[in-house]
Image (tube, rainbow, N blue to C red):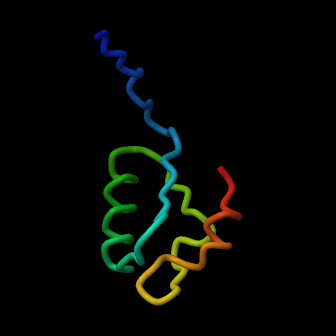
Amino acid sequence: MTVHKPEPLKKGATIGVVAPAGCIDEASLKAGTEAIRAYGYRVELAQSIGGRNGFLAGSAEQGRNQEG
């Protein structure tokens, strides 16, 4: 089996952050996005990143309506 490795991201590239299943902790999200930016990347958060529906990250409808 051949392993294909993508080219490394270049500084200034955008990294998208989503929470497709569980709720996120705001402090962890902040720490994670700061770490990504410290490496020289831009961060784009999904529209529903802070969504909550019980223990899930928003409703099933919100998940279906995500762009990407």
**Quadrant of the rendering where the N terminus is positioned:** top left
Considering depth in this image, is 29 or 5 the residue closer to the camera? 5
Residue 3 left/right relative to 6: left
Q: Is residue 14 above or below residue 20?
A: above
38 and 30: which is toward the camera: 30
Residue 3 is left or right of residue 16, and the answer is left
Q: Position of residue 47 (x, y in %)?
A: 63, 68
Q: Which residue is drawn at 55% across and 56% down?
A: 44
Q: In x, y percent, where is residue 24? A: 39, 75
Seen at 40% across and 73% down, the residue is: 22
Q: Using the image, determine if residue 45 lies above or below residue 59.
A: above
Q: Where is residue 50 in the image (x, y as percent from the top left)?
A: 52, 78
**Location of residue 65 by image quarter:** bottom right
Residue at position x 42%, y 31% in the image: 9
- Residue drawn at x 34%, y 52% is 38
Front residue (pair 17, 13): 17
Between residues 17 and 23, which one lies in front from this camera angle? 23
